[in-house]
Amino acid sequence: MYLSGYRCMWIVAMFDLPVDTKQARRAYTHFVKFLKRDGFTRMQYSVYGRHTPSKENAEVHVGRIKAHLPPDGEVRVITITDKQFERMKVFWGKYRTAPEQPPPQLQLF
């Protein structure tokens, strides 16, 4: 899928953050709330994804994640194309379900 000549991208943020103290739980909560405010949705526990219209826009959101990193724990971010994302296989038990779909985009004719 292309928009204005740019390849649409998905950003997947995966994290393992400590929650053993009140301060750590607060940092975890702030980080998750930031992701949600920035348009990410939960794909799995501690895995959030966001669709972006271009590689350049994806880099902006990755920079925002970097600016909001909690003081402890590990955060991994990967960007993948729509084509790569649609090849993802999602299993619920023994049954396969379709992965999340990108949001509808405005089309001009």
Image (cartoon, rainbow, N blue to C red):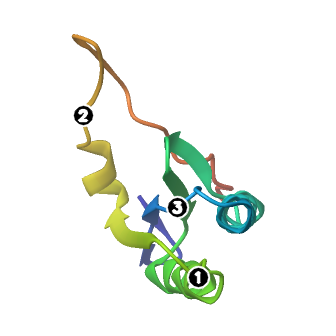
Instruction: Say which of 94 and 10 sits in front.
Output: 94
Q: Which amino acid does label 2 sit on?
A: Lys
Please state which of the two labelled residues, at mark 2 or mark 1, is closer to the viewer.
1
Indicate the amino acid at tag 1.
Pro
Question: Looking at the figure, which quarter contains the N terminus?
Answer: bottom left
What crowding class fits label 1: few (fewer than 14 Cα within 10 Å), some (14-19), or many (20 or more)? few
Q: How crowded is mark 2: few (under 14 residues within 10 Å), some or many (20 or more)?
A: few
Where residue 18 appears, as percent x and y from the top left, is 52, 61
* Residue 83, above or below 100: below
On-image quarter of the C terminus? bottom right
Q: Which mark is residue 42?
A: none
Q: Earlier in the sequence, mark 3 or mark 1?
A: 3
Circle 1 residue: 71
- Work out how far the residue at label 3 is from the one at label 1, CA to CA, in angstroms: 10 Å
Which residue lies at the image location 49% right of the left edge and 50% below the top edge? Answer: 46
- The residue depicted at 59 percent of the width and 80 percent of the height is 69
Q: Residue 3: x and y, percent?
A: 52, 69
Q: In which quarter of the image is residue 87?
A: top left
C-alpha span from label 2 to label 1: 33 Å
User: Which residue is labeled 2 in the image?
Assistant: 89
Q: Residue furthest front?
A: 21
Q: Is residue 42 above or below residue 6?
A: above
Residue bearing mark 3: 18
From the viewer's perspective, is residue 4 above or below residue 12? below
Q: Which amino acid does label 3 sit on?
A: Pro
